[in-house]
Image (cartoon, grey):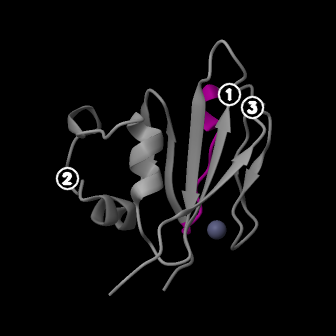
Amino acid sequence: MSSKPIACVEVPSTANIHCPFCGQQVLNPASEDPENYFSVCHHTLFVAHDMGFEFRSERFDAAAGITGVDGDDIDLPEHGIDGLTSQVAIEGAVKFASYVPPPSFYGSYVGFAPTE
Ligand SMILES: [Zn+2]
């Protein structure tokens, strides 16, 4: 089985991110409530930022080879979580990345894939 690598799309850091498959708003960077700034749908592969993962689906863990691995114990490649999430090959998957402007360069990443 061969899968294409995940497609990466850069969006502004203020963008609300919606699932391209069902339209649900998954990331709301303007949320006043830090606990509820994201809300995953069943297409969501991961919600992450440079400091770690907020959400990892079973499909993402399997594709990234990190099933059962604690977030702190993930062996990150060059470019950290940005690099790891860009390597994952799941058919039809899309990753949205946003970067806060300099000097922060702080990145947020949300991935989606169609359900089988
Ligand atoms: Zn969805």
User: Which mark, residue 91?
Assistant: none
Span highlighted in magenta in the image: 34-43
| Residue matched to label 1 | 33
| Residue matched to label 2 | 68
The CA span between labels 3 and 2 is 30 Å
In reply to whether residue 35 is colored magenta, the answer given is: yes
| Residue matched to label 3 | 31
Q: Secondary structure at mark 3?
A: loop
Residue type, label 3: Ser
How many numbered discs?
3
Q: Secondary structure at mark 2?
A: loop
Residue displayed at 48% across by 30% down:
50
Of residue 114 and residue 80, the one placed in the foreground of this image is 80
Magenta region, main secondary structure: loop
Please state if 14 lies on the left or on the right of 72 as rendered: right
Residue type, label 1: Asp
Q: Where does residue 67 sit, x and y in percent of width and height?
A: 23, 57
Q: Where does residue 62 sit, x and y in percent of width and height?
A: 28, 65
Which of marks 2 and 1 precedes in the sequence? 1
Residue 41 occupies quadrant: bottom right
